[in-house]
Image (cartoon, helix red, strand yellow):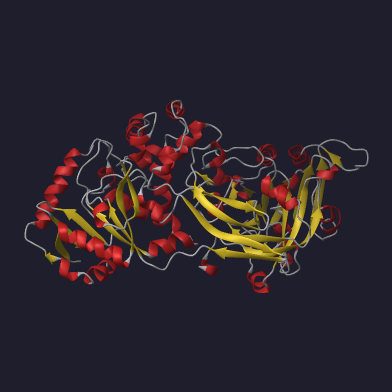
Amino acid sequence: MDSKIIKKDKLLSLLERFIAGYHVLAPVREDGMLVYRPVGIPGDVELNPGRSVLPPKGRFFPQTEILYSYRIEGEKLTLEEYVEEARQVILFGVHPCDLRSFAVLDAVFTEEPRDAYFTARRNNTIIVGVSCSSVLPECFCTAFGISPVEGNGADIHLTDIGAGAYLVEVLTPRGKELLQKFDSLFEDNVAGAEEAKRAKEASLIKKISLSVKVNDLHEKMASIFENPYWEKISRRCLGCGVCTYVCPTCHCFDIMDDGAGKAGERFRCWDSCLFREYTLHTSGHNPRHALAQRLRNRFFHKLSYNNQRYNIEGCVGCGRCVALCPVNIDIREVIGAVRGLV
Amino acid sequence: MGASNPLLPKIATVVDIVRETGDVNTFRVVFDDPEEMAAWNHRPGQVAFLSVFGVGEATFCLSSSPTCRDWLEFSVRRAGKVTTALHELEAGAKIGVRGPYGNSFPYEAMRAKHLLVIGGGIGLAPLRPLVNFMLAPENRKDYGKVEIIYGGRTYNDLCYKEELFRTWPETPDVAVWTTIDVAEEAWQGHVGFVPAYVEEVKPTPEDKFVVICGPPIMIKFTVKALENLGFRADQIYTTLEMRMKCGIGKCGRCNVGARFVCRDGPVFNLTELYQLPQEY
């Protein structure tokens, strides 16, 4: 579709107009941490955000959400669903790795029967992507064919091309419809903008750890299920589950009731396959009783099962789990080890 | 969202509770909305979620036959939080039901074949819908002989006693062998474990499907016995139990390898099971 240019001061005006007409979620600094939050002032928004602590998937799949409430009055039991607000949401400032994660989550949540909560939020959200401006040591998105400057999965995608200007790529009809309302803020695309984007891509890719290769990973994974490697690597795992909480593609949840007696709510919250209780049967039997089994299941989910089931890679190379693991378990090393062991 | 929200249960009433054993009750459940009752369709082997509001939700196999259009039945062993709450209910209580989920026993492929049913304890619950589906007057002509080998720890641990000792044995072309683990004074029947009884009964593998459910150890040794009797892995079906929260392939926890038990199971034949990681 078409592309335009927007100057930085006009981008702030655009954000202001977004805020006036929509609920805007964007990356902001909070206690030094980068997080996605509802914003009211354009100046609060990080225009070149970098990696957020928690992924922006929370817009579609919140850490905790009420599914419905129940009320018992005499003989009568009524359930009331939580209904998504009608106002459209703009999710602003999503990097390419996280944009890919939305496609991974879509495969799970919009497969029939569709998850009504995820689907409602997804349909109600316009996504503004932003190219990366820097590379962190843990980044390896290129291993999964992701470019740090491409906006696949966004409705509109921004790339800082220097000199206070952004290339604006309009990628979907929905993005086009949105920007048409604010036409006066944009300038026509200039010669050299695309070249500037390509040059940016080249300089970013040079800094990304290119040693991670996944071309033969699926075949290798298939033959390494029974291997002492998993027991060995699990010895230092604490089972804390932080890798699953910060992962943009993890979708596991628990469903629980809050309330007793006559009224209460049923909610769901993120869960982790690394927790012992996750697969524990009521009988006491646990199919993945050992941490080694649970850690192996996590890596198999990311590097094999997801692709087998949905034909899309379960990892996007964002590096969050690498950066935050307290004992330095590194999925890039696991990939390397798997490819080297068999 | 309404009708298109698969996580939202439909309200139903417990109309009857049958005490099967010391810790197993069968709950007979009817949707409050007659249209929901009419629209409900499950296949033998499928599961559903029951809700006790304020306590939680858990997965149970349907134990009533799809041919029964007036109510659903669930046999529940009291073991944890939700099952205990269910056991505390009285007839008339309101619960939530959603489902049915999962695949089923291959009742289409079973047409014109004989069926061998092997159950232990409450493991008969998921097999009972298949038996009663095949024995329903409208389906009986489509299926061959039905043989049932069933065991419990004690006489009191046997479920569905009315069907086990009366209805099924009195039905033409149905044979029932029942055993208990340890001898009891009043028990005139066979004493011993199910796998050994299978070896004694010596069922033949020709034109037959086998469905097994029970404690893992019973299944393991029964499969060995069947293989010794000449049964092939693809003739033998079982139903897997995994912890589930959603039933629709989203919450993640019921995976065995790349399969979700709630979507691709719970019914698998042994050929399929031998290809999966042994994590169930």
Say which quarter of the image contains residue A111.
bottom left
A290 or B223, which lies in front?
A290
Above-or-below relation of A308 to A320? below
- Which quadrant does the C terminus of chain B fall into? top right
Q: Residue furthest left?
A: A191
| Residue A281 in the figure: left or right of residue A209 | right
> Does the image show residue A296?
yes
| Residue A277 in the figure: left or right of residue A103 | right
The residue that appears at 41% across and 61% down in the rendered structure is A121
Residue A305 lies, in percent from the top left, at 43, 45
Q: Residue furthest right?
A: B186
Residue B42 lies, in percent from the top left, at 64, 63
A116 or B261, which lies in front?
A116
Above-or-below relation of B94 to B237? below
B241 or B33, which lies in front?
B33
Above-or-below relation of B277 to A195? above
Residue A198 lies, in percent from the top left, at 13, 51
A312 or A98, which lies in front?
A98
